[in-house]
Image: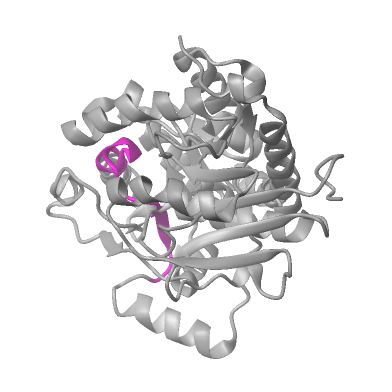
Amino acid sequence: MSPGGDGPGLNVAIDGSFLGAGRGGDETFLRGLLAGLAGRAGPDDAFTVLAPHGACLPELAGNPGFAAVPVPARPGPWHFATLPGRLRRLRPDLALTVTHAPLWGATPTAVTVGDLSFVHRPRDYPARTAARLRALVPRHVRRAAVVLVPSEFTRDDVVSTYRVPPEVVRVVPNRVAPPLALDADAVATADAWLAARRVVPPYLLYLGNLHPRKNVPLLIRAFRQVQRDTPALSRHRLVIAGGRWWRGDQERVAAAGSDRVVFLGRVDDAVRARLLGGADALAYVSLFEGFGLPPLEAMAHGTPVLASATTSLPEVCGDAALLVDPADGAAVAGGIARVLTDGSLRARLRRDGPVRAARYHADRVGDAALAAFRFGVRQPAATRERTV
């Protein structure tokens, strides 16, 4: 019997078909959930992970309750068309899927919804992507036996937007892993890579993808304003690490003419760790978040954080970050200057940040996921299709 609750062992299939595909927060969430389950599942619990051929799953190493089943990489529509057949053969009690789920099939589903930015900010998405999400996600949510979300903010948003019973929507937060321990060779390699790209202290860091809602162009403009107004910060660089999504080169347009803004693209785990540990502060002034993991990752390294005072970020960061209005360029600029120069504030954030990040440990994630799965398994079949 698992620590997640009373009852017989669970038998859950987990759709990890996108692992290794660079899906950012989706992959990070799922890997954290797997790590949490691996640490908290009981001896009678069984989890089958559908993953691409050759996928690396270190979270499951040596755990007899987990099995990996290879699946071919296919476009989303084809994958979800064939998934019901795979589930029928596996016969799990519940199938966990991320964002999307099969539209037919007898297997109850646990669907994860990271956020509803496509509802509230559809302009940040290509028209076809926004239309697909707005059409399908409500159907998945209403059909699910249980819905997993990363924060209370997103839970309230899903309940009010899709009018589903509150008890069906369960919070399973992201895991914040401890800072990565690197050997001397890995440190030297990562530091040499960064130095070749002009990344040396002092610098302000943005870490995350370049999705339009992340508000990176405004961050760049605010940083440039701070450098014009605050001579003491003229040596700082703004380092931007993350993959580009759509909307072309809007960030580079905002940075045009400045040699103090450095774009790195996606970075590996070792470089990520060195960036987080070496930054004077992390700035994350996103316009819409369902959770917001990079601020907590920075806190785990003892790095001060400037974050948005909107959506999920006040809930996640608490008073361990300096919060500002992300739509107000002057407020963002003021926050940058303060988080880089106010010694007493920096000392407090360095002290409080690691304590805050430590709340999001793997055991908490695993226990929340197990409780959600047990709730989903107990739901009668008649409740699995909900209409407005």
Q: Is residue 218 magenta?
A: yes
On the rendered structure, is 107 left or right of 251? right
Q: Please identify the quarter of the rendering in which residue 369 is found.
A: top right
Residue 364, given in percent of the width and then of the height, sits at 74, 46
> In this figure, what is the number of numbered marks?
0
Residue 141, given in percent of the width and then of the height, sits at 48, 27
Which one is in front, 161 or 270? 161
Q: Please identify the quarter of the rendering in which residue 159 is found.
A: top right
Residue drawn at (24%, 41%), measured in percent from left and top? 217
Residue 24, given in percent of the width and then of the height, sits at 40, 53
Residue drawn at (52%, 66%), measured in percent from left and top? 69
Residue farthest toward the bottom in the current orientation of the protein:
185
Q: Is residue 237 magenta?
A: no
Residue drawn at (55%, 65%), measured in percent from left and top? 277
Which one is in front, 324 or 90? 90
Note whether 291 is above or below 161 in the view shown. Answer: below
Note whether 166 is above or below 254 in the view shown. Answer: above
| Residue segment shown in magenta | 200-219
Check the picture and name the quadrant holding the C terminus: top left
Note whether 299 is above or below 65 in the view shown. Answer: above
Q: Is residue 281 visible?
A: no
Residue drawn at (22%, 27%), measured in percent from left and top? 123
Q: Please identify the quarter of the rendering in which residue 110 is found.
A: top right
Residue 28, given in percent of the width and then of the height, sits at 50, 55
Which one is in front, 96 or 191? 96
